Image: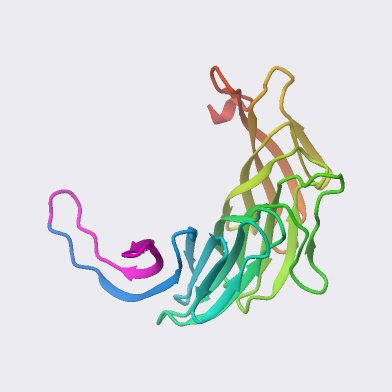
Amino acid sequence: MSFTAFLPGRRAATVLACAGLALGAQAQTAPAWTSAHEVGNFTNDNRGFAVDASGNTYEVSNFMDAAVVGGTTLTSAGFIDAYLAKYTPSGTLAWVRHLGSPGLDQVMDVAVDAAGDVYISGTFDGPITLSSTITLQGSTGPTQNQKGFIVRYSSAGVPLWAQQSSPSSSPQVTASGLDLDAAGNLYATGFFAGSVTYGANTITTPGSVSGYGTYLARFSAATGAVQSLVPGFYYPTTGSINYSNPAWK
């Protein structure tokens, strides 16, 4: 079991634990704590964990100002930044990767494949340089739009590829959830206002909807190539949800 605990003094702690859980009214087994890490103050916002086949744990969090992760201090480049951290089975920090721009950058989910490569999703203002060859591009217009992103890292923390919604998409796009299948596909869910574009695929909310839409995108986990983009449902600022895909009802 993995979770984030808030300790006295409003210090955020990342806690990695193993616990046997009993069902129903049976007595619960006391957790056997593996490790606990203080990572920052109350402005830290943990978003998720994933564990690979070797027992390494991956953590994604957002923070303001600064966060100390396993002795490494991260300083925000702007309003809110994000990080991806890998811990060994004993709880020692293996590496941490900082994602940040002068604007608002947040990570939303993390997933890991059978080889130990890790995938993260979120939203950003940008631009964010991930490596000498991989960059999340900022908006092309005079104002910064929130864009959805997905990044794949190797088990050593090396960025392998990045995908993002078009900088000219709607003012707000988020990649919220991630999952992998056995065939090597990566799925991302998220929401958008107006329209969203990944690769050559675009979906738009109907003219009658003034609120947000949701989407499901499929990518090649190996290359990041966009395979499909379909709408989930639309929800207006008032009224009932409009399901665009009958199979999702």
Name the residue: 67% across, 21% down. 209
Q: Position of residue 139 (x, y in %)?
A: 82, 49
Q: Quadrant of residue 6?
A: bottom left
Q: Is residue 164 or residue 155 the one in the foreground?
A: 164
Task: State yes or no: residue 21 in magenta.
Answer: yes
Asked if residue 247 is positioned above or below residue 62 in the image, the reply reads above
Q: Is residue 84 or residue 18 the one in the foreground?
A: 84
Name the residue: 84% across, 44% down. 200
Asked if residue 37 is positioned above or below residue 20 in the image, the reply reads below
Q: Indicate left or right for 163 with 116 as reference.
A: right
What stretch of residues is rendered in magenta?
1-26
Q: Position of residue 87 (x, y in %)?
A: 48, 77
| Whether residue 222 is visible | yes
* Model colouring: rainbow
Q: Is residue 118 or residue 72 the one in the foreground?
A: 72
Q: Position of residue 144 (x, y in %)?
A: 77, 47
- Number of marks drawn: 0
Q: Indicate left or right for 16 with 110 as reference.
A: left
Asked if residue 136 is positioned above or below residue 239 in the image, the reply reads below
Q: Position of residue 22 (x, y in %)?
A: 20, 57
Name the residue: 75% across, 52% down. 164
Task: State yes or no: residue 173 in magenta.
Answer: no
Q: Indicate left or right for 114 with 13 as reference.
A: right
| Whether residue 113 is visible | no
Quarter of the figure that contains the N terminus: bottom left
